[in-house]
Image (tube, helix red, strand yellow):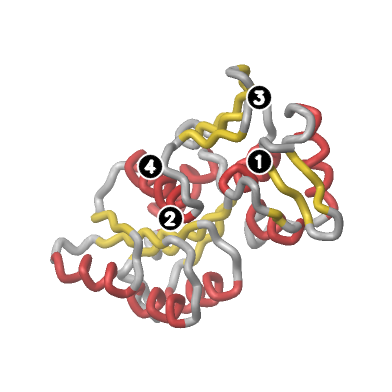
């Protein structure tokens, strides 16, 4: 799962990026509204953390441009402003949730998990596919209660497939959602990760749909 952090305060941006990477996400960052708009308009993100008080282009304007262009990724806005009208303006512009600074990092992570779940039509923090369970709160996966040992990229691939279970996911989609913008992407490595996951999961959970991609399903 891939997250865009838009925050002009360098210290907070670094803290957010570190916390999200530690939680298993691929992370891109932007420090101003112009860069943020470009990244959000050209990249594939599972969620965005967007500060409102940005240089060059404010967060509300960035969000309006994304929504006008049909970009539907969940957006959590951050604001240091206490005025209720700023929060209302953010929601009206297309934000899905908001947090007022200062905030607890655990609350931000929980809100992001909820936004990503809802975008995929999931109600619970635990995603289940047959014997496979993904605990999004702790970034852990298990089969019949037995914990799986996964690398960070294996976890990202599995998490994306679990959030989109029973859907055919192309290799290019996986590449877009498991790597950060500045990572040297190699689509062939996705096949490697899928192969490793198949060795750790019960047979048939990850299906190859010839010419289209992969599907995680319990009905195979």
Q: Would you identify the image quadrant in which residue 93 lies?
A: bottom left
Secondary structure under tag 2 reads helix
From the image, state whether disc 4 or disc 2 is nearer to you.
Answer: 4
Residue 51's place in the image compared with 213, above or below, is: below
Residue 89's place in the image compared with 15, above or below, is: below
10 Å crowding of disc 1: few (<14), some (14-19), many (20+): many
- Res 158 label: 1
Q: Position of residue 182 (x, y in %)?
A: 66, 61
First along the sequence among labels 2 and 1: 2
Return the residue at label 3.
Answer: 148
- Pick whichever, 156 or 132, lies toward us: 132
Q: Position of residue 38 (x, y in %)?
A: 54, 76
Q: Position of residue 131 (x, y in %)?
A: 63, 26
Residue 52's place in the image compared with 213, above or below, is: below
- Res 13 label: 2
- The residue under the point 79% across, 30% down is 203
First along the sequence among labels 4 and 3: 4
First along the sequence among labels 1 and 4: 4
Return the residue at label 4.
Answer: 110
Secondary structure under tag 3 reads loop
Secondary structure under tag 4 reads helix
10 Å crowding of disc 4: few (<14), some (14-19), many (20+): few
Q: CA distance from mark 1 to mark 3?
A: 11 Å
Q: CA distance from mark 4 to mark 3?
A: 22 Å
């Amino acid at each position: 799962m891939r997250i865009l952090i838009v925050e002009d305060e360098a210290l907070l941006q670094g803290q957010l990026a570190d916390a999200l990477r530690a939680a298993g996400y691929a992370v891109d960052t932007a420090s101003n509204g112009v860069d943020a708009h470009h990244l959000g308009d050209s990249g594939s993100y599972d969620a965005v953390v967007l500060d409102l008080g940005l240089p060059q282009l404010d967060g509300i304007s960035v969000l309006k441009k994304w929504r006008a262009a049909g970009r539907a990724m969940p957006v959590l806005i951050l604001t240091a402003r206490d005025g209720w009208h700023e929060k209302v303006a953010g929601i009206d512009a297309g934000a899905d949730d908001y947090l007022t600074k200062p905030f607890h990092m655990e609350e931000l992570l929980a809100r992001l998990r909820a936004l990503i779940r809802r975008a995929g039509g999931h109600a619970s923090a635990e995603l289940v596919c047959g014997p496979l369970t993904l605990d999004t709160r702790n970034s852990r996966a298990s089969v019949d209660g037995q914990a799986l040992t996964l690398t960070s990229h294996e976890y990202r691939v599995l998490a994306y497939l679990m959030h989109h279970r029973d859907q055919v996911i192309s290799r290019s989609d996986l590449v877009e959602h498991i790597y950060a913008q500045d990572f040297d992407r190699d689509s062939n490595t996705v096949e490697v990760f899928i192969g490793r996951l198949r060795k750790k999961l019960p047979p048939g959970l990850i299906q190859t749909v010839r010419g289209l991609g992969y599907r995680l399903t319990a009905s195979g």
